[in-house]
Image: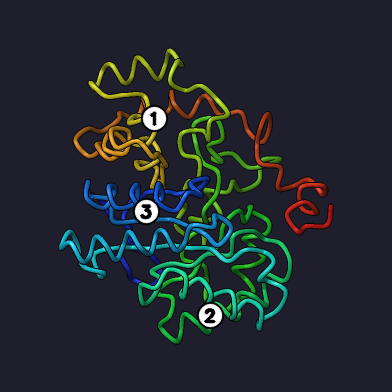
């Protein structure tokens, strides 16, 4: 396992396990438990995923079985926008996540979207961070202009920004020749973390000739190559699967390295903000997330 140092000084694993769209409690608990058994130490959930209780159960079970100690794990959750109306609702949302997980504290807690009163919510998160309830705080889906303004205004700069990052949306290029998302995160010392690191099921990278050739050259799968590409860019990845063999396969990325040419070839498939991106810039998407439609 490789680690990256957050602006808090904490060490965050570069590979984690995601549980987006795993609502069944038993399936989620068993998947997280198997991931921990295989060697994952970063687990990523969210209030909106409705499976914090199952994640907490898996963590407690792994600790009880002697697989790991609590301090070996890096558990992340996220505050949903309905809990971001003001400082009081955000504080209650944080405590609710902690209660559902029941693992003592969270290693990282994120604002899930840059919607509602995310500055008021951040003040509540800063208080929880200073109280030791949250060991680090960060954001998710904060694009370059929003993240820049945010970092210039808050007391505690986010440790992490979890955004869409994969070969079809590298976020290496800025709009109108301005700084890219990756540039802005590097400027402020915010660690990039990829949701949908394999494309989120919206593309078919597993049949991409360039990716297949690189995978064959290293004796690896396309999925392993793509995960390794992001890791070598300094991006934390959180692939999701409920199949033990795929969970094991995704974790097996530490014994090879991509060349600069291979990295460039993978990045050349970038499509920018087009196609089936999550439409964070569209007013109708914002209203939908806020429950206004």
Residue 95 at x, y percent in the picture: 52, 78
Q: Quadrant of residue 134?
A: bottom left
Q: What mark, if any, has residue 29 been given in the picture?
A: 3
Question: Which numbered disc, 3 or 2, marks the residue that appears first in the sequence?
Answer: 3
The reply to whether dot 3 and dot 2 touch (C-beta < 8 Å) is no
Q: What mark, if any, has residue 73 been given in the picture?
A: none
According to the image, label 1 marks what residue? Answer: 263
Residue 266 drawn above or below residue 47: above
* Nearer-the-camera pick, 204 or 65: 65
Residue 48 at x, y percent in the picture: 58, 58
Task: Tell me the SS state at disc 1.
Answer: helix
Which residue occupies 62% across, 56% down?
142
Q: CA distance from mark 3 to mark 1?
A: 35 Å
Residue 262 drawn above or below residue 134: above
Question: Which numbered disc, 2 or 1, marks the residue that appears first in the sequence?
Answer: 2
Task: Tell me the SS state at disc 2.
Answer: helix
Q: How many marks?
A: 3
Judge depth for marks 3 and 2 and give the one in front: 3
- Farthest left residue in view: 66
Question: Which numbered disc, 3 or 1, marks the residue that appears first in the sequence?
Answer: 3
Left or right side of 276 for 6:
left
According to the image, label 2 marks what residue? Answer: 126
Residue 102 at x, y percent in the picture: 39, 73
Task: Tell me the SS state at disc 3.
Answer: helix
């Amino acid at each position: 396992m490789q680690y990256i140092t957050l602006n808090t000084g904490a060490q965050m694993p570069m590979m984690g396990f995601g549980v987006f769209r795993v609502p069944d409690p038993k399936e989620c608990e068993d998947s997280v438990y198997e991931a921990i058994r295989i060697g994952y130490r970063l687990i990523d959930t969210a209030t909106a995923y409705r499976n914090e209780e199952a994640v907490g159960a898996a963590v407690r079970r792994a600790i009880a079985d002697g697989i790991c100690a609590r301090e070996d794990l890096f558990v992340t959750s996220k505050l949903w926008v309905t809990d971001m109306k003001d400082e009081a609702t955000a504080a209650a949302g944080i405590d609710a996540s902690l209660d559902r997980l029941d693992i003592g504290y969270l290693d990282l807690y994120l604002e899930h979207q840059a919607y509602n009163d995310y500055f008021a919510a951040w003040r509540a998160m800063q208080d929880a961070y200073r109280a030791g309830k949250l060991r680090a705080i960060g954001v998710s889906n904060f694009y370059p202009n929003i993240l820049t303004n945010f970092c210039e205004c808050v007391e505690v700069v986010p440790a992490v920004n979890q955004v869409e990052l994969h070969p079809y949306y590298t976020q290496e290029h800025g709009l109108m020749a301005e700084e890219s998302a990756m540039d802005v995160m590097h400027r402020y010392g915010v660690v990039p973390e990829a949701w949908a690191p394999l494309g989120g099921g919206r593309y078919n990278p597993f049949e991409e000739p360039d990716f297949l050739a690189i995978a064959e050259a290293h004796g690896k799968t396309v999925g392993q190559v793509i995960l390794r590409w992001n890791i070598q860019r300094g991006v934390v990845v959180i692939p999701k699967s409920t199949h033990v063999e795929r969970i094991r396969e995704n974790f097996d990325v530490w014994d090879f390295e991509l060349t600069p040419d291979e990295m460039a070839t993978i990045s050349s498939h970038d499509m920018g903000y087009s196609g089936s991106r999550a439409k964070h810039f569209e007013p109708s998407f914002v209203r939908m997330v806020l429950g206004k439609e």
